[in-house]
Amino acid sequence: MTRPAPIRSLGAAHLPTLVLLHGFMGCGDDWRRTARLLSDRYHCLLPDLPGHGSQPLPADLDFEGYCEWFWRQLAPLLPARIALAGYSMGGRIAAWLATRHPESIAALVLEGAHPGLETEAERRARRRHDENWATRLAREPWPRVLEDWYRQPVFADLAPARREAFIRVRSAQDPATLARVLRATSLSGQPDLRPGLAGLTCPRVFIAGAQDTKFSALGQALADTCTGLELVKLDGLGHNCHAQDPGQVAAVMERVCHPMHFTQTSTASS
């Protein structure tokens, strides 16, 4: 059985623990610049998600199975309470984990993360969309697929140099494994997490770039229905805020993940 690879970390182990989850095709190092700004106050853990980098990916996982398998590998390495942050796919995983393990979550930070589809028609459309990409990942030339991936509307704000940098870094991943990840973690198979997020009592914040109109709107709708969840729109930024301006994102995290929350008991409200 393949053992999970070691997790990158920044900051002293005695500090409050902040776990940062990357997006699809990414790796833990995507959060490194943000973590450096926080490492004097937090023990920042930057894991690779299953199927990314050198991390194994068990067969036949659905969304909940993927999240729970990851949690079983991660939890033994954690203190009793952590702050949890995630971007895009990593944010969806963070949201699911927070709703399933609220006693472990001191604060939750979601960046550009979809809370879940609400209708069967939306799920069917997303299933077709993701299956098309998974097929391309498994069969077509990798550089071409990467180029097309980063020309999707959600990445429209990317400057050419940043797009090329993303493609260069992502090209080290294995596309066949990423196809399996996409099928496992498809938004079409994710439950609607809005009720669970509304029931949490820990501090919660949703970060969206103001130029990312889709996720700004999703964040606003989520804040409107989840009492206590804060929406922060960052001016001049698009979908991947922490890559564009790690300082602004780190400042939000430092404000939300206050040390006092790590010693309180957090649960889901009934």
Image (tube, rainbow, N blue to C red):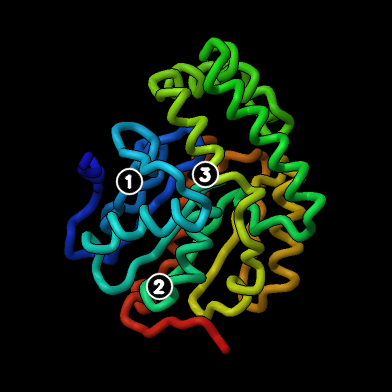
* Disc ID at residue 47: 1
Task: Specify whether 197 is left or right of 16.
Answer: right
Q: Disc 3 marks which residue? A: 184
Q: Point out which mark residue 106 bears.
A: 2
Amino acid on which disc 1 is placed: Pro
Quarter of the rendering containing residue 52: top left
Looking at the image, which residue sits at the far front? Answer: 60
For the C terminus, the image quarter is bottom right
Q: Are marks 3 and 2 in contact (CB under 8 Å)?
A: no
Element marked by disc 3: helix
Name the kind of residue labelled 2 in the image.
Answer: Ala
Please rate how many residues cluster around mark 2, counting C-alpha atoms within 10 Å: few if below 14, some from 14 to 19, many from 20. many
| Image mark for residue 111 | none
The reply, left or right, for residue 111 in relation to residue 168 is right
Where residue 249 appears, as percent x and y from the top left, is: 50, 50
In percent of width and height, residue 267 lies at: 46, 82
> What is the CA distance from the residue labelled 3 to the residue labelled 1?
18 Å
Q: Which residue is located at x 72 percent, y 51 percent?
A: 216
**Lower sequence index among marks 3 and 1:** 1
Distance in Å between CA atoms under marks 1 and 2 = 18 Å
Mark 1 crowdedness (10 Å alpha carbons): few <14, some 14-19, many ≥20: many
- Could one spot residue 14 in this view of the protein? yes
Mark toward the viewer: 1 or 2:
1
- Element at badge 1? loop
Seen from the viewer's position, the closer of residues 32 and 72 is 72
Contact between marks 3 and 1 (CB within 8 A): the answer is: no
